[in-house]
Image (cartoon, rainbow, N blue to C red):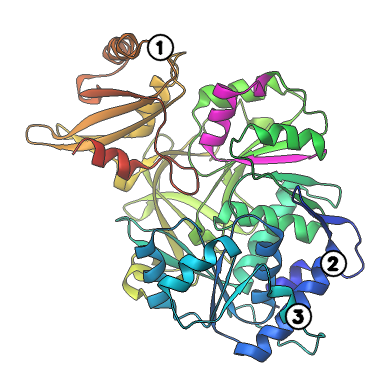
Amino acid sequence: MNFANYLLSRANNNSHPLIFSGVEQVSHNESYLIVNRLATSLVEKIGMGKTVLLLADNTTFFIVTYLAIIRSGNIVVPIDPKSPEKDILYFADICDFAIIFTQDKYSIKIHSMIPGIDIVTEKNYRSLSKEVSLLPETSDEDLAAIIFTSGSTGEKKGVMLSHGNLIENTASILEYLDLKATDRVCVVLPFFYCYGLSLLHTHIKAGGSVVLSNHPFIGGALRDIDKYECTGFAGVPSTFQILIARTKFLTEKLPTLRYFTQAGGKLPNKFIRMIAEAFPDKKFIVMYGATEATARMSYLPAEMCLSKIGSIGTGIPGVKLKVVTEGRDVQPGEVGEIIAAGKNIMQGYYMDPQGTDEVLVDGWYHTGDLGTVDEDGFIYVVGRSKNIIKCGGFRVSPYEIEGEICKIPEVEDVAVVGREDNILGEAIIAFIKSSTSDPAALQKTVQEFCRRMFPSHKIPQEIHILKELPLTSSSKVDREKLRCMVE
């Protein structure tokens, strides 16, 4: 089945709002009509099975063109509009785009980089629309999207997702979040990121609404939650840490909000506890996923948020998730690699059979994340294999050190990385985000705290106090940039 057809299966007769963007409100049935007309035009213009670049912020333009490309039987490639020129040229080189959809403000840049290609913008995309004719069908195995993500060595890899992958993961998320047509999510995560896309997918299918909260400062989302009576809010760790440190988030009432979801990395237990205790009437759901798994692989039920604090839970419906070492499942407390199997797992990396073979082995996706389990089978991420620091012959998990340092009141966030060292192999370097007026005093506090808490091989050799930690385009801490700062 075509994924866009699956999402819009009940949209034609649904006048309920789908999109609130601050400048316009668009209903499900209006979206349905625009998507199918634009899809008809695309089929006539480029056929099907072609790659199509989509470069836009979170807008109505992104949503309807994204769905139309998929509905037309073509392959959508959504990328960060702020991608550096070298990345865009790389994407264009390997994907050979048939046409490009972009916001007006990015069109001059794209014209200069990729001359001679047909570019459609916000100003003229509706003029392409034609009366709907019979649109092509697709199979579950046909490719629907290529989402670029960083690989294990930092290079960009194109994750190939089929219509079946997207349908399977969307259905599973709908089931465990119990989303209904009355649900309305406040979206601060970008749609070129799989977590952001999953919010869009689930709320279209449920018949609910998405509020595009595109404020320069994330604190504006709190106003949007109340203004639009949102029932859901999703964030990565930095989302919640910024809200806690820089706004009155923890004292807000947010009366319509039903749940929070958190994924995209490990939020320190300190902050999970703060949120759970500040909002006892709202669900806080920790999730775990990867672009290679379409979006989600596991979740921790909200009622276990504190009793199993720090856990990513267990596999979502339809996904097998386990932790293995040396070809067997780990015992409680033992560390191994987290692997997953299910119909949500990608088809492979685009134009990269070797990279595909490295992570897809015997039907299992090898995440590269290290984890352990407790006696009840709940999974805990302890680090990423590429981020494990080998210090003085010991393997040290940055997550362990970060979780402890975060307990210091003045610490808003922390990231620990390894730096090459002639004596230790790798030295442990801690970067701390804090708005303290006395960085030297905080540095001393952290040093003394670490000497009390850790054995010698886990004590950071250097501690740097920063006003902000560098973030990637999906708001995760950019560890590569931090490593470059101390090379």
Q: Which mark is residue 437?
A: 1
- What is the x, y in percent for residue 240? 58, 31
From the image, state whether disc 3 or disc 2 is nearer to you: 3
The Cα–Cα distance between marks 1 and 3, rounded to whole angstroms, is 57 Å
Q: Which mark is residue 129?
A: 3
SS at badge 3: loop
Q: Which residue is mark 2?
A: 30
**If the image is split into quadrants, where does the N terminus sit?**
bottom right
Q: Residues within 10 Å of mark 2 (few under 14, many from 20)?
A: some
Q: So how many labels did they put on this image?
A: 3
Nearer to us in this view, 74 or 1? 74
Q: Over which residues does the magenta segment extend?
A: 229-250
Nearer to us in this view, 444 or 181? 444
Rendered position, 98 above or below 322: below
For marks 2 and 1, the one nearer the N-term is 2
Residue type (three-letter) at the residue carrying disc 2: Glu
Is residue 237 rendered magenta in the image?
yes
- What is the x, y in percent for residue 483? 26, 40
Residue type (three-letter) at the residue carrying disc 3: Ser
The Cα–Cα distance between marks 2 and 1, rounded to whole angstroms, is 52 Å
Nearer to us in this view, 158 or 324? 158
For marks 1 and 3, the one nearer the N-term is 3
